[in-house]
Image (cartoon, helix red, strand yellow):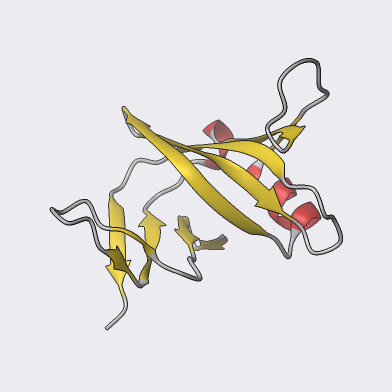
Amino acid sequence: MEMVGEDLRLHFDHGYIALTEDFPQVEGNILLQKADLDFSCVHLLSDHGAYGDFRGKKLEIPEFLKDYSPFSLEITDEYYGYNTVVYGGYLSLPDREELIELSISLYYTGNIIYEVKD
């Protein structure tokens, strides 16, 4: 994940699932145009998505990118609303064996562009 000017690009090692019939996996990235970081955040939840009590953390996107890079994400859910996308999944860090459940809420005023590698 990286800021490119006022846009936010999500890089995928293995691409993403296309939303067309047969739902193939395609190589590419997702670009959210005009990401508004004042209304975007990351919620770090429990290890392995465990139920019960836990202590979480809410971070602004620049703080998350600074404090947790390098990282990889496995996005398992996505929700779309008015100029907002919420990705749910798991955070993997190189120096930590346990995965951390997370939710990324992103507000944007441009388009979502599904970039496909040729």
User: What residue is rendered at 48% in x and 59% in y?
Assistant: 10
Q: Height in image: 110 above or below 47?
A: below
Quick check: 97 left or right of 73?
right
The quadrant holding residue 81 is: top left
Residue 3 spot, x, y in % from top left: 54, 60
Q: Height in image: 92 above or below 101?
A: below
Question: Of 40 and 73, which appears nearest the observer?
Answer: 73
The number of numbered discs placed on residues in the rendered structure image is: 0
Question: What is the residue that sits farthest to the right in this orientation?
Answer: 95
User: What residue is rendered at 50% in x and 48% in y?
Assistant: 75
Residue 111 spot, x, y in % from top left: 28, 49
Question: What is the residue that sits farthest to the left in this orientation?
Answer: 21
Question: What is the residue that sits farthest to the bottom in this orientation?
Answer: 118
Question: Of 71 and 5, which appears nearest the observer?
Answer: 71
Quick check: 37 left or right of 111?
right
User: What residue is rendered at 55% in x and 36% in y?
Assistant: 40
Q: Where is the C terminus found, in terms of image quarters? A: bottom left
Residue 33 spot, x, y in % from top left: 36, 53
Q: Where is the N terminus found, in terms of image quarters? A: bottom right
Q: Height in image: 37 above or below 39?
A: below
Quick check: 101 left or right of 53?
left
User: What residue is rendered at 71% in x and 20% in y?
Assistant: 51
Question: Of 12 and 42, which appears nearest the observer?
Answer: 12
